[in-house]
């Protein structure tokens, strides 16, 4: 007899929770902590991409309504929103010597043990060049990065997969995010369709080595080489791969060459969906993945970082291809991560972070841990009652960015993934929330949400009273 009113109460709760998003103050704090914490090559690259998606979607390859390459003419608003991306590009190129003239090239960050990570800064450099930003030779730096990847200094497999490491042939799932999107964007900027095909080829090669058919399509983290392979199904690695493939897909789909790459676009969408189908059966009731998606060890901790990026890729896949299969699961993750009070968190089984500085599960300190700095003051009480952020505004719990086997205290890439999830959900909501059972009316808890909740509550109470009357009349 209570079925109807209970359903309405559940509906009311889901609407309220799903409508929760980060406030402007929270977004600003996450951005500031990311700016202060991002120092490594891949952190700078993912920061640039997160800023494009959040603040300048007209320059993001994940926005289908804009051409790629974007219109190069800038105005004061675009200059402001791209300022941090320009700074990343300028600082990287300014630190470089003139590139070699023999065609061997050089990476955008010298001395990096990774062959792939420096390329993640490449799109920021290409945008700086495309928009006419002065002061540095961005075109030469971007070309040198391409030459370096294909040159003799970077080892390759026999079938042509570019190694993620410089010292030996080693393939990391991370590299799918770092290299192919840069190659695709370089191909668009230079009108080189062969480079677009090569971006696709690199994804295809990496998939052939890393996708584990015995595990339903989960990707292994590191294969080949003799130094530190990791055959486990690292959640962040699967997220990196899915997000990288989506960026290549978006680049191809919005370019003037899209008709020439229809098969490749379809493959990329299917391969992202393949990772989702392998990952989401491992999603826990609390909305988070473990650090290793299917790992059973006692030290396999919950990881908000990979959970955020995976959820962002679900929303993006729905927009780019129409595949909405795991939207409800992504909404569960987003509602858990962005919950604003302990009551809401407990209702969906989310543990509450009680310390402002979560301790890693290992005694080894995080090499990226640093004093909160100015962002802590800016945060004020913005994160005082959030289950998956410290009071300073750091996403938690997260994997250590330098040691993927242990829990970390602070993760710049986790901050970037937070912004990506916020912007992906914002764009998905603006498109009508395709695939959602309960579509949030806006990206913020506002008057419309309160009114909708009130209406739902009234309906629920009315239904409860009707059920009670029915019981009385049946006696």
Image (tube, grey):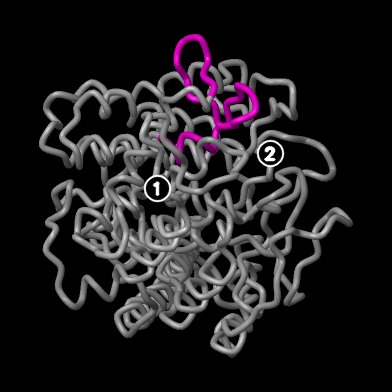
Q: Please tell me how crowded label 1 is: few (under 14), some (14-19), or many (20+) other residues with Cα within 10 Å.
A: some
- Residue drawn at (40%, 27%) of the image: 271
Depth check: give the residue in front, 474 or 102: 102
For residue 461, which quarter of the picture?
A: bottom left
Q: Is residue 19 magenta?
A: no
Label 1, secondary structure: give it.
Answer: loop
Q: Position of residue 205 (x, y in %)?
A: 45, 19
Label 2, secondary structure: give it.
Answer: loop
User: Which numbered disc, 1 or 2, marks the residue closer to the eye?
Assistant: 1
- Residue drawn at (53%, 51%) of the image: 41
Where 308 sits versus 194, above or below? below
Q: Which residue is mark 1?
A: 98
Q: Which residue is mark 2?
A: 292
Report the predominant secondary structure element of the magenta stretch. Answer: loop
Q: Earlier in the sequence, mark 1 or mark 2?
A: 1
Where 206 sits versus 464, above or below? above
| Residue at the top extreme of this rendering | 158
Q: Position of residue 222 (x, y in %)?
A: 64, 28
Q: Position of residue 256 (x, y in %)?
A: 10, 37
Tally the marks: 2
**Relative to residue 322, is residue 327 drawn left or right?**
right
- Residue drawn at (33%, 53%) of the image: 125
Q: Position of residue 126 (x, y in %)?
A: 29, 50
Q: Which residues are magenta?
A: 155-179
Depth check: give the residue in front, 270 or 136: 136
For residue 405, which quarter of the picture?
A: top right
- Residue drawn at (40%, 42%) of the image: 99
Q: Please tell me how crowded label 2 is: few (under 14), some (14-19), or many (20+) other residues with Cα within 10 Å.
A: many
How many angstroms separate mark 1 from mark 2 (CA)? Answer: 42 Å
């Amino acid at each position: 007899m209570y079925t109807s009113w209970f359903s309405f109460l559940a509906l009311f709760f889901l609407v309220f929770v799903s409508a929760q998003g980060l406030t402007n103050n929270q977004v600003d704090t996450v951005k500031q902590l990311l700016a202060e914490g991002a120092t490594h090559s891949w952190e700078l690259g993912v920061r640039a991409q997160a800023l494009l998606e959040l603040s300048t979607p007209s320059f993001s390859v994940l926005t289908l309504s804009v051409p790629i390459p974007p219109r190069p003419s800038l105005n004061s608003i675009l200059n402001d929103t791209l300022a941090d991306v320009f700074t990343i590009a300028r600082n990287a190129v300014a630190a470089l010597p003139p590139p070699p003239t023999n065609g061997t090239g050089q990476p955008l960050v010298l001395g990096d043990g990774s062959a792939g990570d420096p390329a993640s800064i490449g799109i920021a450099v290409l945008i700086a060049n495309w928009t006419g930003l002065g002061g540095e030779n961005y075109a030469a730096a971007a070309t040198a990065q391409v030459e370096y990847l294909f040159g003799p200094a970077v080892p390759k497999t026999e079938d042509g997969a570019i190694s993620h490491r410089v010292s030996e042939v080693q393939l990391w799932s991370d590299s799918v995010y770092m290299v192919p999107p840069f190659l695709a964007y370089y191909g668009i900027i230079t009108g080189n369709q062969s480079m677009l095909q090569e971006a696709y080829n690199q994804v295809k090669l990496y998939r052939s080595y890393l996708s584990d058919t015995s595990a339903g399509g989960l990707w292994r983290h590191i294969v080949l080489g003799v130094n530190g392979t990791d055959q486990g199904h690292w959640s962040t690695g699967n997220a990196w791969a899915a997000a990288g493939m989506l960026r290549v897909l978006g680049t191809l789909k919005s370019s003037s060459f899209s008709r020439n790459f229809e098969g490749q676009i379809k493959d990329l969408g299917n391969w992202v969906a393949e990772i989702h189908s392998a990952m989401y059966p491992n999603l826990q009731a609390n909305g988070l993945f473990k650090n290793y998606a299917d790992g059973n060890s006692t030290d396999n901790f919950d990881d908000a970082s990979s959970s955020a990026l995976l959820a962002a890729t679900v929303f993006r896949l729905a927009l780019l291809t129409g595949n909405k299969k795991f939207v409800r699961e992504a909404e569960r993750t987003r509602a858990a991560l962005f919950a604003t009070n302990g009551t809401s968190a407990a209702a969906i089984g989310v543990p509450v972070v009680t310390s402002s500085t979560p301790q890693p599960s290992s005694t080894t300190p995080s090499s990226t841990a640093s004093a909160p700095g100015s962002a802590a003051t800016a945060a004020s009480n913005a994160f005082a009652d959030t289950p998956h952020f410290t009071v300073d505004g750091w996403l938690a719990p997260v994997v250590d960015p330098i040691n993927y086997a242990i829990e970390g205290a602070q993760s710049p890439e986790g901050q970037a993934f937070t912004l990506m999830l916020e912007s992906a959900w914002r764009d998905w909501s603006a498109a009508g929330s395709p695939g959602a059972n309960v579509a949030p009316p806006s990206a913020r808890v506002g008057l419309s949400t309160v009114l909708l909740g009130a209406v739902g509550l009234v309906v629920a109470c009315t239904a409860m009273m009707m059920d009670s009357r029915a019981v009385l009349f049946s006696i």
